[in-house]
Amino acid sequence: GTGSGAMTTAMARCVWPRGRVHTFEFNETRAKKARDEFEMNGLVAPLVTLKHRDVCSDGFGLDRVADAIFLDLPEPWLAIEHAVSACKHAALFCSYSPCIEQVQKTVEKLRELRCDRIRTTEIRERAFKVEEVSFPELP
């Protein structure tokens, strides 16, 4: 889902000025808040299009137009058939899943749909030290 809109904002900056980002949010309140923030930051159509929609049950409403799909959903495997329908041939697919059980079900569904070049990458936590630093005021 769109969530806070941080990933959508990052993607929009990557594809600007010719690309497009379609983002979908199931929760109406979050969708409205994200839409307001996108508009405040100049991220409007055609660059960013936000829809309040359940992509797991209703799909993306796109047909063979996406170069890539990024999912951040609790049950991403439920949206994969719709994602395949939304993608161009040889499109990229990425799903953020913090639990291995989510990864397993997602990979099973990708294999069932005969997707290829499936790869899973674990991102490991890295500790770092946060310190408060103060600077003198400029005159």
Image (spheres, helix red, strand yellow):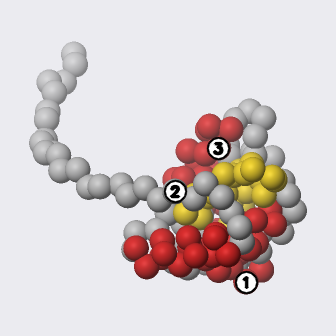
Instruction: Give the position of the N terminus as an image quadrant.
Output: bottom right
Quadrant position of residue 64: bottom right
What residue sits 63% from the left and 76% below the top?
A: 109
Residue bearing mark 2: 119
Q: Position of residue 72 (x, y in %)?
A: 54, 66
Q: Is residue 113 visible?
A: yes
Quadrant position of residue 58: bottom right
Q: Looking at the image, tell me whether mark 1 or mark 2 is earlier in sequence order.
A: 1
Quadrant position of residue 129: top left
Q: Mark 3 or 2, which is nearer the eye? A: 2
Q: Looking at the image, tell me whether mark 1 or mark 3 is earlier in sequence order.
A: 3
Residue bearing mark 3: 12
> How busy is the neighbourhood of tag 1: few (under 14 within 10 Å), some, or many (20 plus)?
few
Check disc 3 and report its element: helix, strand or loop. helix
What residue sits 78% from the left and 35% below the top?
A: 18
Q: Position of residue 113 (x, y in %)?
A: 72, 72
Judging depth in this view, the residue of 137 and 32 nearest the camera is: 32
Q: How many marks?
A: 3
Q: Amino acid at mark 2?
A: Arg
Name the residue furthest bottom. 57
Q: Amino acid at mark 3?
A: Ala
Image check: 47 left or right of 12? right
Q: Is residue 29 visible?
A: no
